Amino acid sequence: MFGRLGPFELILILCIALVVFGPSKLPEIGKSLGKAIKEFKGHANDISKDIDPNTQSKNEGNSEK
């Protein structure tokens, strides 16, 4: 998703967010966004484990090495 965004674009998005939300709300929004992404990735991993039960056994085998 962020592979096509360069540093200039990221700085521009951050500046726009700073103007729209203000400096006091920006850390709170970032924290909420980080939690949402973490939760989404966790659910995506759970779904992939449900679809392919061999994935879990392969991952457990790698952690024992």
Image (tube, rainbow, N blue to C red):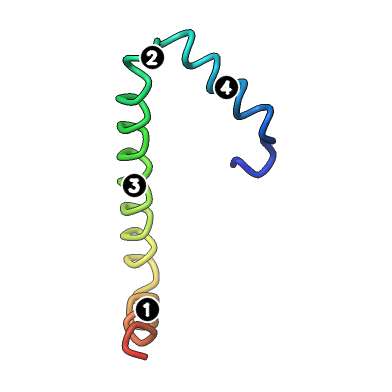
| 3D distance between C-alphas at marks 3 and 4 | 21 Å
Q: From the viewer's perspective, is residue 1 above or below residue 21?
A: below
Residue type at the position of mark 4: Ile
Which one is in front in this view, the residue at disc 2 or the one at disc 4?
2
Residue at 39%, 84% in the rendered image: 62
Q: Which residue is mark 1?
A: 59
Q: Are marks 3 and 4 in contact (CB under 8 Å)?
A: no
Give the class, few, some or many, for how many residues have Cα within 10 Å of label 1's Cα (few <14, many ≥20): few
Q: Nearer the viewer, residue 8 or 48?
A: 8
| 3D distance between C-alphas at marks 4 and 1 | 37 Å
Residue at 38%, 54% in the rendered image: 44
Q: Tell me the element at label 3.
A: helix
Q: Which residue is mark 3?
A: 38
Is tag 3's residue or tag 1's residue first in the polypeptide sequence? 3
Q: Which residue is mark 2?
A: 23
- Rendered image quadrant of residue 51: bottom left
Q: Nearer the viewer, residue 64 or 57?
A: 64
Is tag 3's residue or tag 4's residue first in the polypeptide sequence? 4
